[in-house]
Image (spheres, rainbow, N blue to C red):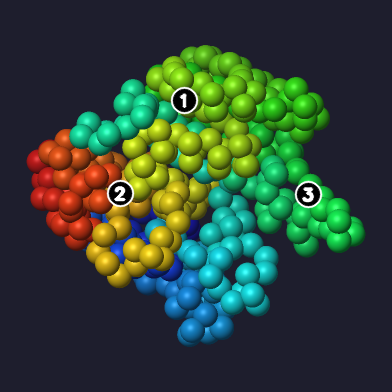
């Protein structure tokens, strides 16, 4: 975001990328909620810039993520990304990173912040859950994100496959600062999740750097756990966690587990960000079998958009987007508490009906 765009007097310019499957439905529902929440918070109407990705982009330009889309993102304040279904793309469009991964790498969105919260009115295996997983988003054991050129996964023979995991001090430091700053606004506890007992160089570096960074945040208590123990404890006693910070692959797995324990991946919000750019993207996929049936749960992307608004509020030093984010989160919680939910949560509401119920509650505060 340029300095000129970082002016609270200017309306937000937000990218809107439908993606595949249920993407157009949940992205449209999210835009409606964001528009209404910003208006209720006294913020100017945002300017939406619609961009192409996925099957639609392939049909239009022969590329699931056109360069025009990437170039346009650089001129926006932030953007909302719908899910992609790259597994269904033709083979020639499945080479390299999927669209979401390409965007994250292109713009250096090194922090993936994934809250998991149980809501009153939603049946949850862990009704006491209220935690955030802070996932290092740029390296680790993900082959599409840790190389300047080529992939970190390769096969020297037909019978042998190898993958390279990369952990750097700089990336560990910046994600540890994100986790500690976030914990300072919550219950002031960070748990470092690693596997240093069997990966002492890479995971040992991650653990040790996180502990060192924590010394710069004296109000935050810090401990650490092996990832397998953390997975077990998420099931047994999730209420003991506040903020977990971990590497890329571990964070991906643990956040899906936490999302299901808190009720459903349909509630699993996510923000990908750096200090200067951010993207709202729900954790769930494109669910192509639900596409076009008005049955998808839009809550995860709506909650992701609330996270995006809060990030923009801090970035622009403007309280209005944060007020809008508060309204979205409270309205969704109140809608669930009233017994209104989509089919994945055992409810009867359609995508549109759920969204209208949320919009009606945005004006209560």
Give the residue number, with chain letter if any, for mark 1.
235
* Residue at x 34% of width, y 37% of height: 263
Q: Position of residue 318 (x, y in %)?
A: 31, 44
Q: Name the element at disc 2.
A: helix
Say which quadrant the C terminus sits in: top left
* Mark 3–mark 1 CB contact (< 8 Å): no
* Residue at x 77% of width, y 54% of height: 152
* Mark 2–mark 1 CB contact (< 8 Å): no
Give the residue number, with chain letter if any, for mark 3.
163
* Mark 3–mark 2 CB contact (< 8 Å): no
The first of marks 3 and 1 along the sequence is 3
Q: Position of residue 13 (x, y in %)?
A: 36, 63
Checking the image for residue 354, the label placed there is none
Checking the image for residue 344, the label placed there is 2
The CA span between labels 3 and 1 is 29 Å
The CA span between labels 3 and 2 is 36 Å
Question: Looking at the image, which is closer to me, 137 or 175?
Answer: 137
Query: For mark 3, does the 10 Å Cα neighbourhood hold few (<14), some (14 to 19), or many (20 or more) residues?
Result: few
Query: For mark 2, does the 10 Å Cα neighbourhood hold few (<14), some (14 to 19), or many (20 or more) residues?
Result: some
Residue 11 seen in render: no
The CA span between labels 2 and 1 is 21 Å
Q: Position of residue 40 (x, y in %)?
A: 15, 50
Residue 232 seen in render: yes
* 283 sits to left or right of 337: right
Give residue 270's quadrant in the image: top left
Above or below for 317 versus 81 = above
Query: Looking at the image, is mark 3 or mark 1 nearer the viewer?
Result: 1
* Residue at x 16% of width, y 57% of height: 353
């Amino acid at each position: 975001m340029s300095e000129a765009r970082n002016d609270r007097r200017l309306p937000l310019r937000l990218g809107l990328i439908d993606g595949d499957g249920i993407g157009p439905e949940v992205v449209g529902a999210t835009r409606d909620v964001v528009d209404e929440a910003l208006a209720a918070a006294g913020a100017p109407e945002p300017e939406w810039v619609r961009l192409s990705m996925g099957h639609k982009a392939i049909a239009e330009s022969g590329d699931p993520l056109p360069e025009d889309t990437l170039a346009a993102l650089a001129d926006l304040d932030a953007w909302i990304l719908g899910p992609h279904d790259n597994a269904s793309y033709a083979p020639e469009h499945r080479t390299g990173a999927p669209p979401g991964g390409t965007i994250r790498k292109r713009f250096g969105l090194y922090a993936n912040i994934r809250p998991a919260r149980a809501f009153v009115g939603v049946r949850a295996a862990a009704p006491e859950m209220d935690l955030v997983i802070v996932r290092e988003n740029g390296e680790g054991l993900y082959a599409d994100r840790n190389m300047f050129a080529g992939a970190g996964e390769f096969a020297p023979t037909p019978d042998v496959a190898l993958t390279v995991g990369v952990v750097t001090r700089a990336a560990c430091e910046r994600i540890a600062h994100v986790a500690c700053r976030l914990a300072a606004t919550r219950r002031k506890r960070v748990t470092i999740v690693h596997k240093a007992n069997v990966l002492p160089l890479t995971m040992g570096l991650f653990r040790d750097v996180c502990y060192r960074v924590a010394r710069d945040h004296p109000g935050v208590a810090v401990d650490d756990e092996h990832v397998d123990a953390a997975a077990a404890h998420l099931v047994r006693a999730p209420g003991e966690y506040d903020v977990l910070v971990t590497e890329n692959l571990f964070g991906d797995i643990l956040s899906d587990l936490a999302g299901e324990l808190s009720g459903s991946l349909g509630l699993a919000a996510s923000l990908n960000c750096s200090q200067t750019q951010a993207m709202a993207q729900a954790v769930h996929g494109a669910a192509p079998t639900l596409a076009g049936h008005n049955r998808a749960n839009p809550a995860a992307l709506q909650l992701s958009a609330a996270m995006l608004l809060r990030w923009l509020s801090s970035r622009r030093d403007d309280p209005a987007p944060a007020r809008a984010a508060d309204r979205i989160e409270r309205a969704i919680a109140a809608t669930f508490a009233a017994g209104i939910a989509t089919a994945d949560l055992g409810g009867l509401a359609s995508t549109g009906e759920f969204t209208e119920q949320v919009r009606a509650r945005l004006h209560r505060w």
